[in-house]
Image (spheres, coloured by chain):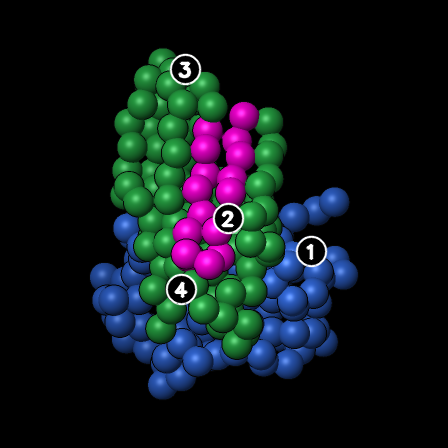
Chain colours: A blue, B green
Amino acid sequence: EAGVAQSPRYKIIEKRQSVAFWCNPISGHATLYWYQQILGQGPKLLIQFQNNGVVDDSQLPKDRFSAERLKGVDSTLKIQPAKLEDSAVYLCASSIRDNSYNEQFFGPGTRLTVL
Amino acid sequence: ILNVEQSPQSLHVQEGDSTNFTCSFPSSNFYALHWYRWETAKSPEALFVMTLNGDEKKKGRISATLNTKEGYSYLYIKGSQPEDSATYLCAFFSNAGKSTFGDGTTLTVKP
């Protein structure tokens, strides 16, 4: 079974530039999560999708971050414009359904550095 | 904001030592607790999903217990090996549909 795929693995940009990350979840997984993990901290949920609908985006900085999950499969997360404090690892995860009784499967993450 | 705390923040042990970590979470509105292991340069990997007070789960040398009434979970590693070196994360899920990860315990096992 293929795991969660993410790209790119690394990205370096300057502040005020834009960046986009891509995630392909495990086939058949209805729920997709985007997390931001700042060094020394635990992953923080940015947005959770159930199929192509948003379940929770309460911690997504909507003035600069956006995410979509077209057709309930792949997802993209965009930052526009980036700030220095956006430097972090962005993790995508998926689970078979959204009831928190199911483990999440994580991708390798994208390490973003904003200069 | 849900307060989830993990202790200790880091731990250095010798190969063969047994160790344990703590995850503290709100004792109200409990729905589930997950434990994940995150090795350097790899993806976080699920260890346990715990849902009932008194749950005890085991996978090889790693086990976990859950006390929802007092709001804590313990993760035990028996006879630590260098390959156990990783950051161990817990994630608390409330019945209001919110979740929070702790900041993790980083374990280093020296040969």
Closest to the observer: B102 or B28?
B28
Tell me which corner region of the image, top left, top right, bottom left or bottom right, holds residue A18: bottom left
Magenta part of the chain:
B61-77
> Mark 4: few, some, or many residues within 10 Å (few <14, many ≥20)?
some
Residue B47 drawn above or below residue B108: below
Pointer 2 residue: B66
Pointer 1 residue: A26
> Mark 1: few, some, or many residues within 10 Å (few <14, many ≥20)?
many
Using the rendered image, report if marks 3 and 4 lie on a common chain.
Answer: yes
Spatial separation of the CA atoms under disc 3 and disc 1: 36 Å
Check the residue under mark 3 and report the chain it is in: B
What percent of the width, then of the height, locates residue A104?
A: 59, 55
Check the residue under mark 4 and report the chain it is in: B
Pointer 3 residue: B16
Q: Amino acid at mark 2?
A: Leu
Which of the two discs, 3 and 4, labels the residue nearer the N terminus?
Answer: 3
Q: Which mark lies nearer to you, 4 or 1?
A: 4
SS for dot 3: loop
